[in-house]
Image (spheres, grey):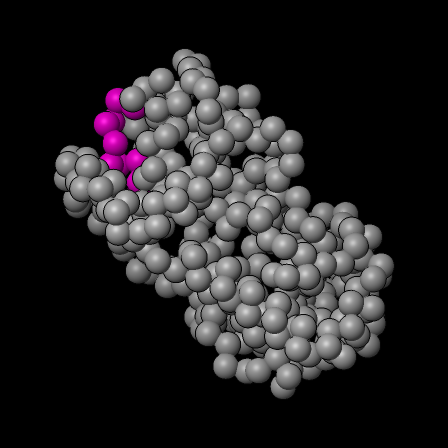
Amino acid sequence: MFKDFKRLSFKHKNNKFLYYLRAYVGLYVVPAIIYQRKLRDKLSQMNAFDAAYVQQRVDYYNRLKDTRILSSGAQSIRDFKLGKKQKTYFFDTWEYIRYFNPNLKGLFLFGDITHVPNEPSIVKSRPIDGDITNAVVLKLDKIRHFLFVHDTKLFQDKKNMLVGRSKAQQPHRVRFLEMYFNHPLCNIGQVNTNANLQFLSNRMTISEHLNYKYILCQEGFDVASNLKWVMSSNSLAIMPKPKYETWFMEGTLIPDFHYVLIKDDFSDLIERMIYYNEHTAEALKIIENAHQYIRQFKNKKQEDLISLLVLKKYFEKTGQL
């Protein structure tokens, strides 16, 4: 029971009550026409920021260059309605598409997307490599993914160990547990109870994770959802090179500069940990680089502007504007 109680811990977590309150007010109380009238003013805020940087991020998320007309299956903004499932995806999309003409259309693929759609589509996640033009990234499911922490414990004062808790439903996560579950330098385990019960471990709060120098950031069905808060902490994110990315632009992260890289087969994990135990200055530099990377996502007005420009470009490149 106690381990389940930890799931209710609100420390270091986004406030879901306020999130849903604002979302429902914006959906049911404030008419969309109010937001549509504000679009021009919103876009004019480009002058308040580094225009080159903003455009660089817009073009990173939206790789469309040539016009690509959507099929008849595209959904109009007017018909974009709240369903029983994936509410956070709906609200995070609605937060920005409500600024546009309700007759405009789009394709919206919600969930852990690991393939590239056949047509230009709005997604939360996409592969990093290959032709990913049709996968246009928006900041979705951010209540879960975009979480940052204020870590007051210094790296030097933390345990010289790796910590990690997650659901182990994918072969690579199970393989990692098979290799290191009983290792004296690792406190790792799974929290799901539907398989591999030999790896079942007590849940841990984020605060408990922050007592360790190394935190495992392992991709699941798409990205490692804990990577953002780990990189905002005074611990080191340790992981293989990511294969998928979201609004966090995981594809731009530099190994051993923003995080500690381990091989895809995990074989050098202990070696890498021992190295940074003995080279504290290098570890601290990576942590500072990670903090610097995080800062670009903390300006709400800039994030809003980039999101609107990504959608504007989407509607333009699909021949609607």
In the orientation shown, which residue stands out farthest toward the bottom?
157
For the point 50% across and 76% down, the residue is 151
Question: From the image, which quarter does the C terminus lie in?
Answer: top left
Magenta segment boundaries in residue numbering: 94-104
**Can you give x and y, in whole percent of width and height, for residue 113 in the image?**
56, 37
For the point 50% across and 60% down, the residue is 293
For the point 69% across and 51% down, the residue is 241
In terms of depth relative to the viewer, which is nearer, 237 or 190? 237
**Can you give x and y, in whole percent of width and height, for residue 104 in the image?**
30, 23
Q: Left of 18 or right of it: where is 206?
A: right
Is residue 204 at all visible to an observer of this figure? no
Task: State yes or no: residue 127 in magenta.
Answer: no
Vertically, is 130 above or below 105?
Answer: below
Numbered label tally: 0
Question: From the image, which quarter does the N terminus lie in?
Answer: bottom right
Vertically, is 239 above or below 5?
Answer: above
In terms of depth relative to the viewer, which is nearer, 132 or 188? 132
Q: Left of 204 or right of it: where is 16?
A: left
For the point 38% across and 36% down, the residue is 310
In terms of depth relative to the viewer, which is nearer, 164 or 193? 164
In terms of depth relative to the viewer, which is nearer, 230 or 282? 282
Vertically, is 176 above or below 131?
Answer: below
Give the quadrant of residue 175.
bottom right
Q: Left of 225 or right of it: where is 314?
A: left
**Can you give x and y, in whole percent of width and height, for residue 114 in the image?**
61, 37
Q: Main secondary structure of the magenta part?
A: loop
Give the quadrant of residue 210.
bottom right
Is residue 142 at all visible to an observer of this figure? yes
Q: Left of 318 or right of it: where is 135?
A: right
**Can you give x and y, in whole percent of width and height, for residue 116 in the image?**
58, 29
